Image (cartoon, helix red, strand yellow):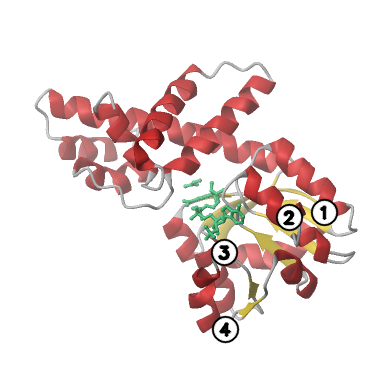
Amino acid sequence: MGSPMAQNLIKAGCDVTVWNRTKSKCDPLLSLGAKYKASPEEVASSCDITFAMLADPESAVDVACGKHGAANGLSPEKGYVDISTVDGPTSKSISRHIKATGALFLEAPVSGSKKPAEDGQLIFLTAGDSPLYEKAAPFLDIMGKSRFYLGEVGNGAAMKLVVNMIMGSMMASFSEGLLLSEKVGLDPSVLVEVISQGAISAPMFSMKGPSMVQALYPTAFPLKHQQKDLRLALGLAESVSQPTPIAAAANEQYKVAKSHGLGDKDFSAVMEAVRTKM
Ligand SMILES: NC(=O)C1=CN([C@@H]2O[C@H](COP(=O)(O)OP(=O)(O)OC[C@H]3O[C@@H](n4cnc5c(N)ncnc54)[C@H](OP(=O)(O)O)[C@@H]3O)[C@@H](O)[C@H]2O)C=CC1
Ligand SMILES: O=CC(=O)O
């Protein structure tokens, strides 16, 4: 996700400096004109605004607050925008760390996958320092099609987790439907077509259905991240005693799929966990 987002900034003429743990993944960005720095700390000290896009809470904390993390390079007037999908407590902890340097913090997880990232069509769910929201807005508008400002840090994370909880449950349910249709002698491709014309039509079903029918799961949103989001969403629900039995059942299916080596496949590969008692 970070790579196509950075590409869009470069193509729009922004002065972009990049870092990634695996440096070779920066090469396409460097050939487009990005500069490279050897650590998040160096990126933050050389840029007005640093955007972070990390896998999970652990890596988001490490890159922001760890040794040679971005916080070490921040100072007043600078801003740190964390786009990673994490839970509210993690985001608040990163925020405290960043703001102790005098810099501003914005959480800004995105809804939208690899293709929307490539097309500059992401939906930003932001919360935190409003002056940084205003300052970052022109860049968010290059990478995305819309942006929501949701107030206090934690609200962007919560919105993202609720959206992805629904998405993960929908995908598990869709998988069950495809497999059931096949078992009762229907053509699952026709099911995809029927769904696309009715009230439960969703771009996700139309986009992923045709390849799922062929048991193909080319990665756009890695299954391991969908399971992480369900786990974090269940934690959010637990924190307010909200029952979420459907999401909990879906989470079990993603856990099974992950434990069978499907974590790096697209999250639609949850269908393999539904197909068999793996
Ligand atoms: N893919 C999607 O469709 C969407 C993803 N998201 C969210 O965006 C985030 C990124 O997703 P995506 O790009 O798909 O994930 P990837 O797994 O493709 O990339 C994860 C990134 O995090 C880095 N990383 C992982 N662990 C560490 C660590 N310990 N220290 C430093 N860097 C680390 C990776 O570095 P390296 O290259 O070295 O492995 C890589 O740059 C996730 O939070 C995900 O939930 C949100 C919306 C859509
Ligand atoms: O987080 C994943 C997405 O597609 O949005």
Residue 142 point in image, percent of width and height = 59, 68
Q: Quadrant of residue 81?
A: bottom right
What residue did someone put label 1 on?
98
What residue did someone put label 4 on?
33
SS of the residue under disc 1: helix
* Residue type at tag 4: Gly
- Where 272 sits versus 15, above or below? above
* Residue type at tag 2: Ala
- Where 239 sits versus 31, above or below? above
Front residue of 141 and 215: 215
* Residue type at tag 1: Ile
Contact (Cβ within 8 Å) of mark 2 with mark 1: yes
Earlier in the chain: of badge 4 and badge 2, it is 4
SS of the residue under disc 2: helix
Residue 118 point in image, percent of width and height = 46, 64
Q: Is residue 220 visible?
A: yes
214 vs 7, left or right, is: left
Label 3 to label 4, Cα distance in Å?
Answer: 17 Å
Ligand 1 within 8 angstroms of badge 2 C-beta: no
Label 3 to label 1, Cα distance in Å?
Answer: 23 Å
State the mark number for residue 133: none
